[in-house]
Image: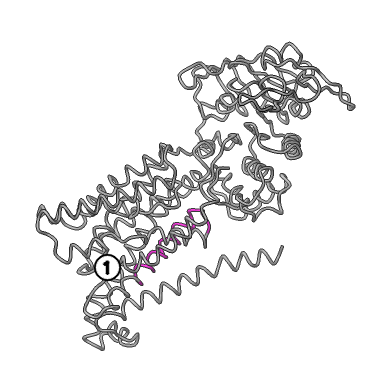
């Protein structure tokens, strides 16, 4: 499963992770190069979050090794791992109504002593990189989901980690913000960050990720560029959907559920007609 | 851009200047006001020794009281800031959560049992009581099955339970004299330099702990999972913050009794003015706590001639509007 890129930033060997008393994830090998964007796809419960948490050093694997920038994660202290990895869980809570700049500055907490000037500069650069410099004094409670997501990404990258781990960063966002968030991740990758992003949307995964890792019931079933990984058989086997490939004017392909045109009318239990999306679970 | 940075710089300076001025005024008021009110000039004559009566009033009675007010006010407000950080609950407060109640119980039991240990030993014992008082609300907050408002409400119930138990202990031993009653609403009456020194020792220890907790508590505010990903243990941070709070609440409750809403009011006011970062928040809350306690004692001693009102009459009157404003603005506490 080589990345094809010269410099490996993240590598996984013979990884076994248990979670909630059962074997949740088993990955024989994975390499990620600097600047690479790896999309992790798979149905709910496939182990995407478990993989990201293990890579972030938050779950101790039962077996195997994760190497970050040449160092064994299990031999590093939690702060050392935090300096190398920026991780954003899908569900977050904020106990205090922080401004964007305050939130982003807290991304520097794992760093050793930094002068006030250094931390201000790091925050300013992170905000500029994420295109939200003008939002620095806005409170997170007053921001839309898409703007808030960019603020959290700025928080994750302010300490310049080598690896960025994002768990479903596009969920609950409108299409424009989904694309903006992934464009931002691409931009960060072009600056040398290696990113692992769990996604549900196959079109976004195809469009933005260099490679896809398909997980099913805790095991990788395919890894590689989207065009060689996604096919009718895999989508049926892993996701349980009958899908067809639509050719895009740009030359690529998009996978869509194979449904007859238009929504299907379904008789509701109470006798009233309801409209339901045709197709299988996502 | 330059205007906003200039505004921000000004905003950074004026609260500190205002805080220093307020502190000076409150401290002077505490020395001037009382059964016999002194002018600032006579207070000065008392300090220099030119006026014998003023000297006795100021140096022997009011100065130790003022110092004690500063130390207890600072302790309770810093403890509230630490408890709010540890529980992620803006309503956390030593009195409201029953932390002070646990400490007061230790004092009541010792008084009834006729134990009178040296103050330096008694204060940490009260700290153990505070820790017991903190256990239930903090564990509930950590389990996460009760909402923040729910935890605060349970804390109020526990606080009520403690005060009734303390009353029961005192009543059963025929201890319901005025001094014990005054202690339930907070009082600095009859306290002197020995209490102040002992309190200074424990406040000093707590300051070290709070300084070490600045980063962990800042991380904890982002939620447990994110705090862990920044390399901080939420469990350790929470336990250490609660221990530091008990180290502050136990000794100060021993010295002053229970003072309602002072911690909540000062910690929340400090959040509004200095933001949520604990490096600025905790010291600012502590200074506000000192100011409020000084003002409360000055008013409580001088409002009704010949009577000392409980400190709580003032702190609760200040604290209640703050409590309302905190819960009023609670809409921001939606999850991100």
Q: Is residue B252 above or below residue B189?
A: above
Quarter of the rendering containing residue A270: top right
Q: Position of residue A8 (x, y in %)?
A: 68, 25
Q: Which residue is mark 1?
A: B310
Q: Is residue A78 left or right of residue A226?
A: left
Task: Examine the structure image and report whether residue B278 is included in the region drawn in magenta.
Answer: yes
Please provide the residue range marked out in magenta: B275-295
Which quadrant holds the N terminus of chain B? bottom right
Describe the element under mark 1 as helix, strand or loop.
loop
Q: Chain of mark 1?
A: B
List the single residue furthest toward the front.
A271
The residue positioned 29% from the left and 51% from the top of the image is B159
Which quadrant holds the C terminus of chain B? top right
Toward the viewer: B153 or B229? B153
The residue positioned 38% from the left and 40% from the top of the image is B140
Magenta segment main secondary structure? helix
Q: Is residue B304 visible?
A: yes
Quarter of the rendering containing residue B40: bottom left
Toward the viewer: B91 or B199? B91
């Amino acid at each position: 499963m080589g990345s094809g890129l010269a410099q490996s930033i993240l590598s996984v060997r013979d990884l076994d992770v248990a979670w909630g008393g059962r074997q949740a994830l088993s990955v024989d090998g994975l390499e990620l190069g600097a600047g690479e964007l790896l999309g992790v796809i798979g149905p709910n419960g496939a182990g995407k979050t478990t993989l990201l948490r293990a890579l972030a050093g938050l779950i101790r694997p039962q077996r195997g090794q994760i190497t970050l920038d040449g160092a064994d994660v299990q031999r590093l202290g939690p702060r050392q791992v935090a300096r190398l990895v920026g991780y954003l869980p899908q569900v977050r809570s904020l106990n205090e109504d922080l401004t964007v700049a305050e939130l982003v500055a807290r991304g520097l907490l794992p760093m050793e002593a930094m002068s006030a000037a250094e931390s201000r500069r790091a925050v300013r650069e992170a905000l500029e990189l994420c295109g939200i410099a003008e939002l620095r004094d806005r409170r997170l409670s007053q921001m839309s989901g898409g703007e808030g997501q960019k603020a959290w990404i700025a928080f994750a990258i302010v300490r310049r980690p080598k690896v960025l781990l994002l768990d479903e960063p596009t969920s609950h966002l409108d299409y424009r913000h989904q694309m903006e968030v992934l464009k931002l991740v691409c931009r960060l990758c072009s600056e040398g960050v290696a990113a692992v992003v769990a996604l549900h949307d196959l079109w976004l995964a195809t469009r933005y990720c260099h490679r896809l890792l398909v997980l099913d019931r805790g095991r990788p079933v395919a890894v590689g560029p989207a065009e060689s990984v996604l096919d009718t058989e895999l989508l049926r086997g892993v996701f349980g959907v009958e899908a067809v490939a639509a050719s895009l004017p740009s030359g690529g392909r998009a996978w869509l559920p194979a449904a007859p045109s238009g929504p299907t009318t379904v008789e509701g239990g109470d006798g009233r007609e309801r409209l339901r999306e045709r197709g299988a679970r996502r | 851009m330059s205007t906003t940075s200039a505004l921000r710089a000004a905003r950074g300076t004026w609260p500190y200047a205002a805080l220093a001025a307020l502190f000076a005024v409150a401290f002077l008021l505490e020395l001037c006001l009382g059964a016999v009110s002194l002018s600032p000039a006579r207070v000065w004559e008392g300090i220099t020794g030119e006026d014998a009566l003023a000297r006795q009033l100021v140096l022997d009675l009011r100065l130790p009281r003022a110092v004690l007010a500063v130390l207890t006010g600072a302790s309770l407000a810093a403890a509230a800031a630490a408890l709010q950080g540890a529980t992620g609950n803006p309503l956390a407060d030593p009195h409201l959560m029953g932390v002070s109640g646990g400490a007061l119980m230790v004092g009541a039991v010792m008084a009834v049992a006729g134990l009178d240990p040296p103050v330096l030993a008694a204060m940490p014992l009260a700290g153990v009581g505070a820790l017991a008082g903190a256990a239930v609300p903090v564990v509930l907050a950590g389990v996460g099955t009760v909402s923040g408002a729910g935890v605060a409400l349970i804390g109020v119930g526990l606080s009520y339970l403690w005060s009734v138990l303390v009353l029961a202990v005192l009543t059963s031993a025929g201890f319901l004299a005025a001094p014990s009653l005054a202690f339930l609403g907070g009082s600095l009456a009859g306290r002197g330099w020995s209490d102040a020194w002992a309190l200074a020792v424990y406040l000093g220890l707590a300051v070290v702990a709070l300084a070490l907790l600045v980063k962990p508590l800042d991380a904890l505010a982002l939620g447990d999972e994110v705090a862990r990903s920044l390399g901080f243990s939420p469990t350790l941070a929470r336990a250490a913050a609660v221990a530091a709070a008990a180290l502050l609440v136990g000794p100060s409750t021993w010295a002053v009794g229970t003072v309602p809403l002072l911690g909540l009011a000062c910690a929340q006011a400090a959040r509004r003015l200095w933001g949520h970062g604990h490096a600025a928040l905790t010291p600012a809350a502590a200074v506000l706590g000192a100011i409020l306690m000084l003002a409360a004692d000055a008013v409580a001693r001088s409002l009704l001639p010949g009577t000392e009102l409980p400190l709580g009459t003032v702190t609760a009157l200040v604290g209640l509007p703050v409590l309302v404003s905190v819960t009023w603005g609670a809409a921001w506490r939606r999850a991100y």
